[in-house]
Image: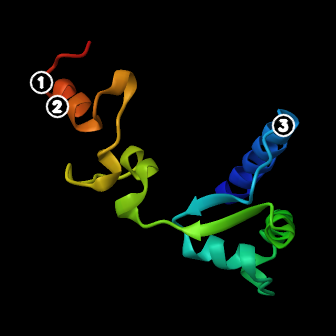
């Protein structure tokens, strides 16, 4: 499960920042999968979720300790979706900046025009 990996990374990052002397509040992991969010917050006994339980025990423990929180992110606001889905260019997730401060739309326009090798 991707959310388990995200929680491992968040927990490591929180510990790393605290070692550097930067006290960290609870970190937030954004997830676009409603089922993963539900399984991570609530223990569900079902034949289909039996293999998932071990991974989500770790996630549940971290949520209960308050170290990391999990929240829903919509497709419109999820920048990771531009790598996996076809999105309209007016999507707010594409409004950020890319390498060298260029907007993502400018980079995409240059790529379409063949300005990149």
Q: Residue 30: x percent and y percent?
A: 57, 60
User: Which residue is farthest top?
Assistant: 117
Q: Relative to 16, is 25 above or below?
A: below
The answer for how far apart the CA atoms under marks 2 and 1 are is 6 Å
Asked whether disc 2 touches disc 1, contact meaning CB atoms under 8 Å apart, the reply is: yes
Any mark on residue 58, and which? none
User: 10 Å neighbourhood of mark 1: few (<14), some, or many (≥20)?
Assistant: few
Mark 2: few, some, or many residues within 10 Å (few <14, many ≥20)?
few
Which quadrant, please, contains the N terminus? bottom right
Label 1 element class: loop
- Judged left or right of residue 10, residue 117 is left
SS at circle 2: helix
Check contact, mark 3 vs mark 2: CB within 8 A.
no
Mark closer to the chain start, 3 or 1: 3
Image quadrant of residue 91?
Answer: bottom left
Where does label 1 land, which residue?
Answer: 113
Q: Is 35 rendered above or below residue 91?
A: below
């Amino acid at each position: 499960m991707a959310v388990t990996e995200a929680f491992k990374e968040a927990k490591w990052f929180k510990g790393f920042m605290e070692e550097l002397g930067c006290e960290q509040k609870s970190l937030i992991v954004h997830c676009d999968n409603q089922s993963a969010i539900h399984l991570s917050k609530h223990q569900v006994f079902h034949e289909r979720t039996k293999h998932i339980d071990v991974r989500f025990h770790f996630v549940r423990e971290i949520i209960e300790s308050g170290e990391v929180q999990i929240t829903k992110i919509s497709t419109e606001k999820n920048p990771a979706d531009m790598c996996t889905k076809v999105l309209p260019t007016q999507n707010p997730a594409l409004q950020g900046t890319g390498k060298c401060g260029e907007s993502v739309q400018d980079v995409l326009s240059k790529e379409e025009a063949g300005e990149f090798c």
